[in-house]
Each structure stands twice: as structure tokens, then as C-alpha cells.
Amino acid sequence: MRYLFLVWIILCILHTEVDASENSSVNNPASKNAVYGSVGFGGLYLIVNANYERLISISDKKSLRQVSARLALGKWALWADSGSSYLLGVNSVWGRNNNHFEAMIGAVALFEKSSYKISVSNANYPYPGYDRVPTRLEYTMFLPAAGIGYRFQRPDGKFIFRTGIGWPEALYVSFGIGW
């Protein structure tokens, strides 16, 4: 999975010609920063994220428009378990006008809060030889993250609307701003 992630980054960088700081030569300047909220659901699973994107590069080519780094922090819940989520990824956006196709690949850390609390309460017996208190890292899953979807954002506009499917967001909807 690590090699697939590196190949994705290399391909995205090879398709770009212009650095984000030199966007004067591009006909449609992109927002360098974006903040948006996401709500994703899939059956009994729900996730809510606050996202930040920072533009890495933009392109003159017809296919790829921009590549950005993405950081997402949020909460998730699944039936009787819940916890925090931390996502770091690379987001690619294709399309020139208002309507875009986007794809993301990265990694996510999901902390299982409910399981951790149960384990901590079971480990706190006050007698010799009791189990040690577990660490939060023992209840954190590190998984690959990926997604594809639709993005509405005018080239010079601030409003962002996103929808699509992926992991860990499942079926998601997002609203935000770019500047």
C-alpha cells in the first residue's frame, strides 16, 4: 500500500507543470486553501470531519487541474463503538470549469474510544499482578484511505460542494470555502 501511495504522488506531480506560487500563467487560478466540513454515512456507520486542504500545485493541462494536501480531523461512530479519526492524504482535482472530478489517497488513524474505556476500566483492579493500563495507540487502527467524487467549485469562487464515496467517509457530503 505504501508503494501505491508513492506511485500516486509521483504521477500527480509529473502531470503538473506550474507551482502553486506561480499561478499567474494559469487561466483559472485555484484557491490555495480550503476548509470544509464532511458528513459521511454507510448503514450503521457515521463520520463527521473538519477538513483543511493546502494547494501543492496547479496545472495548465486539460486533464489535471490541481493537487493538494489534505488533513481531516473528526469523530466516527459504529453501532456500539465510537472514536476519533485523523486523515492525511493527497487530493487530485480534474476539470476546468465549475464541475470537477476528484480523487484522494492517503492514510487514516481511527481511535476506538469505547473499547479503550472498557479495557482501561477492566485493567484497574487494585491487587498485585493486575493488568497494566493499555495505551491509546493499542486501540488505534492505521488504515489506507481513498475516495472518488464530484466537486463543485468555481475557478475563482469561494464556495465548495463535494460528494462521493470512499473510506473512511463512506457516502459523503461536504460544504466549505476556499481562499
Image (tube, grey):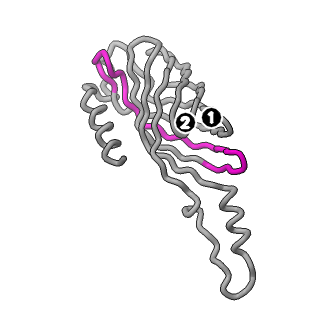
| Residue 124 screen position, x and y as percent | 72, 75
Mark 1 highlights which residue?
Answer: 42
Would you say residue 133 sits in the magenta stretch?
no
Q: Nearer the viewer, residue 71 or 113?
A: 113
| Residue 8 screen position, x and y as percent | 32, 37
Q: Which span of residues is magenta-colored?
A: 58-84
Look at 58% across and 47% down and name the residue there.
85
- How many marks the image carries: the answer is 2
Question: Around disc 2, counting alpha carbons within 10 Å, would you say few (fewer than 14), some (14 to 19), or many (20 or more)?
Answer: many
| Residue 101 screen position, x and y as percent | 43, 21
Instruction: Indicate the secondary structure of the residue bearing disc 2.
Output: strand
| Residue 67 screen position, x and y as percent | 37, 30
- Labels 2, 1: front one: 1
Residue type, mark 2 in image: Asn
Q: Nearer the viewer, residue 87 or 33?
A: 87
Look at 56% across and 21% down and name the residue there.
161
Q: Is residue 119 left or right of residue 14?
A: right
Would you say residue 82 sits in the magenta stretch?
yes
Of pointers 2 and 1, the one earlier in the residue sequence: 1
